[in-house]
Amino acid sequence: MPVKLLIPTALLRYADGVDEIEVQAATVKEALEQLADGHPEIKRHLFGADGELRHYVNVYVGTEDMRHLDGIATVLAEGAEVTIVPSIAGGVGVLRDDFESVTLSKEEMLRYSRHLIMPEVAVAGQKKLKAARVLCIGAGGLGSPLTMYLAAAGVGTIGIVDFDVVDYTNLQRQIIHGTEDVGRLKLHSAIDSLKSINPFVNVIGFEERFTSENALDIVKDFDIVIDGTDNFPTRYLVNDACVLMGKPNVYGSIFRFEGQASVFWAEKGPCYRCLYPEPPPPGMVPSCAEGGVLGILPGEIGIIQATEAIKLILGIGDPLVGRLLLFNALKMSWRELKLRKDPSCPLCGDNPTITELIDYEQFCGILPPSVEAPGQSLSKWEMSVVELKASMDRGEKPFVLDVREPYEREIANIPDTILIPMNEVPNRLNEIPRDREVILQCRSGQRSMDILEYLRTQGYTELKNLKGGVLAWSDEIDPEVAQY
């Protein structure tokens, strides 16, 4: 019988750009197998070498997670919609009961007057907002709009964890920063912007990386944590810290034209690990810096996160606990999927095995090439752009493999390089020589390092990663090469 498979943006390129595919199938297994048979690259993303569905891929039948139905054997009704959801990171109050001691000045009464005349907020609710302490991990795409709206709403204490600096590529979406802030710490720029929006708000900055060593100390003094991260190790760290500390985790993630939002709160429902028990392999899901993002998208998802935080503070409405919102900007459509707590979750399940924070870089498979031999340095596998240019000038014609996408090559290019996009590498190994040194190159050096690691597993030994990629070439060799 005919059923419809809904393809996410991350897999569109492997489905000829089609986001809906109709197949004839009686079960989820048959539907996915037909999809995989017709699109081999999708098969590699959905199924492991053992033929089993990968753990970081969720499949929904209608609005129900198939894991809570009959799994991959779930029977499909005619016309059923099967949604593939890969990993890309009423009335429930969360707050202290001491808000009555909070006072609002005459100026604050005027500022928040549109709140005060709403019976769902009123003076008591505005006091709750002023008493609230909300922590945002990251002052980037998601953190920008959500902290600005929290400040405008009168959330009394906003914490921000960020150690990065503002660059020009941020300005397309990170609206808390301006052109004059380029080169400044994002934390300082964000604090200035929030104080400009609302001088009555107390902003606490943590100019440091959010790590297993400091996470619990930072989280403990806040009521709500908002995930504004852009990488899997920190996303799992935020989740685990929130579960261990009993805090709600307001989740958002973005990729190109699609976004996700939910509230993970182990005391009331599932946590992030219930949805994604394990992360995808390194390099499988590109970051916004590598894959791109529509500049408006983080605003849309960030505002959802801010809305959820305010609902939690006020104790009104139905929070997104146990629900996952999927947003497609190209279609301007929203889908809501049900989430359920996983009894076997290693963190919040019936018999947890994770009782403290772990090494999240290792958990996500992000390991330096030197782990195989004590004392080996990362430089063993790296080449600088200066060294590459010198080799070219000597007429040595090195084999430089560009693993970016064709549209990136149109933006900026190092001369005399060979293009094989990273996802095509496994099927084009015959084009990569084994009898000479291969230099791997991408935008910044991250994707090329991932491919270097993959090629090593395929028996390649003469490999170098171009440190800094095209960006370093532009900085150190040819300033005419565009940066992006």
Image: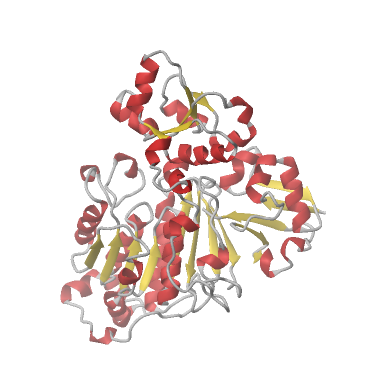
Say which quarter of the image contains residue 87: bottom right
Q: Residue lying furthest front in this view?
A: 374
In terms of depth relative to the viewer, which is nearer, 140 or 307? 140
Identify the colour scheme used.
secondary structure
Residue 267 at x, y percent in the picture: 49, 79
Say which quarter of the image contains residue 471: top left
Viewport quadrant of the N terminus: bottom right
In terms of depth relative to the viewer, which is nearer, 451 or 123? 451
Residue occupying image coordinates x 30% and y 56%: 162
In terms of depth relative to the viewer, which is nearer, 442 or 374? 374
Residue 344 to residue 370: above or below: below
Q: Residue lying furthest top in this view?
A: 395
Viewport quadrant of the C terminus: top left
Residue 470 to residue 333: above or below: above
Residue 185 at x, y percent in the picture: 23, 50
Residue 294 appears in the figure: no
Say which quarter of the image contains residue 427: top right
Q: How many marks?
A: 0
Residue 227 at x, y percent in the picture: 40, 62
Q: Is residue 444 left or right of residue 39?
A: left
Residue occupying image coordinates x 54% and y 72%: 270
Residue occupying image coordinates x 20% and y 73%: 108
Residue 54 to residue 125: above or below: above
Residue occupying image coordinates x 60% and y 39%: 13
Residue 200 appears in the figure: yes
